[in-house]
Image: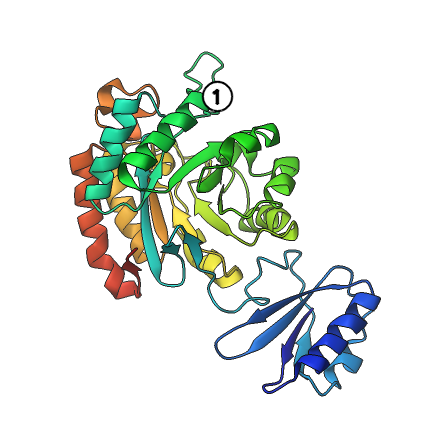
Amino acid sequence: MVLVLKKGYDQKQLDNLIGWLKGLGVDTHLSEGRYQTILGLVGDTSAVDIELVKSMDIVETAKRIQEPYKNANRKFHPDDTVIDIGGIKLGGGHFQLIAGPCSVESEEQIITVAREVQKAGAKLLRGGAFKPRTSPYAFQGLRAHGLELLLEAKKATGMPIVTEIMEASHIPLFEDVDVIQVGARNMQNFELLKELGHLDKPILLKRGLANTLQELLMSAEYIMAGGNQKVILCERGIRTFETATRNTLDLSAVAMLHEMSHLPVVVDPSHATGISRLVRPMAMAAAAAGADGLMIEVHNDPTHALCDGAQSLTPDAFAQVSEDVQKILPIVGKRMDG
């Protein structure tokens, strides 16, 4: 249930309303937007008499929400959420490029790539330290040492880092990571999501290979229900019958998620297509569809990459993508900034 509050209400009225609702076993979430203030009711609202609520002086209108996700729902929070990552804003018109190698391979490699993508306009550095791989024989990442190398790249460039977590027991290792990524395979690892909900740190949540948008938002809800409202959604392609590309990039998800939720949405064209030459057109299409950012794999020597070289761009190719995307952003009312 959501309550739209009348303009000019006083704090005592609000405190009395919240206290009454808590007495009914209902939690509340206050969202003060540009044009209206909304009080979201979270939990079992069956005991709340909606007609009684509508009659209260402080309440403009009230309505029940059918969707099972509450915190992530735009009806609770009409204004776009803007995530602040060390002064870099994502969402609400702020567009960002997140770029770097699939896997951290060496200190020289990660720092070289970081400097190149930063020069081309990326504000956030991605890089895999812990790698979930389909084959147990494939490169699994440098793990804790990989995190150390990412932090060295951060020192060298000042770029906040984005990297994937595999399990809840690894959370202490991610204390200095700026954005924790939850990969597609872990989108419904609910115990991990619950633990991430206790952090005060942005979480980039990737859509699962065969999950609906509602399931993605329900996973975001697990994080937000724990108190962490800093969630970034990521469309990275879904598994369909098509085999020409690694996955099928669902760009309709960008527009649909913006209708369903207030959370920022980024697109990963690298994992979606699996083919480097398709990254540029899909990146441009994602920007035109209204994405709040792009997550792109960049490697200084893709031919010899230990992981996903076929979908990785060279720094020069990434610079071209960045230039092309920036031409589209003003058309959709977005901007790249710090």
Q: Determine the residue positioned at 69% across, 84% down.
A: 58
Residue that sits furthest to the front in the current view: 155
Above or below, comparing residue 67 to residue 31 in the picture: above
Label 1's element? loop
Q: Nearer the viewer, residue 31 or 275?
A: 31
Q: Nearer the viewer, residue 147 or 209?
A: 147
Among the 4 quarters of the image, the one containing residue 211: top right
Q: Determine the residue positioned at 19% across, 51% down.
A: 324
Above or below, comparing residue 19 to residue 95 in the picture: below
Q: Position of residue 150 (x, y in %)?
A: 37, 31
> In this rendering, does residue 297 appear at all?
no
Among the 4 quarters of the image, the one containing residue 69: bottom right
Locate residue 264 relative to residue 57 in the image: left or right: left
Q: Residues within 10 Å of mark 1 (few under 14, many from 20)?
A: few
Q: Determine the residue positioned at 47% across, 16% down.
A: 135
Q: Position of residue 215 (x, y in %)?
A: 59, 47
Locate residue 135 relative to residue 170 in the image: left or right: left
Among the 4 quarters of the image, the one containing residue 141: top left
Residue ID for mark 1: 134
Q: Position of residue 161 (x, y in %)?
A: 38, 39
Locate residue 293 relative to residue 131 in the image: left or right: left
Above or below, comparing residue 129 to residue 83 in the picture: above
Q: Nearer the viewer, residue 166 or 61?
A: 166
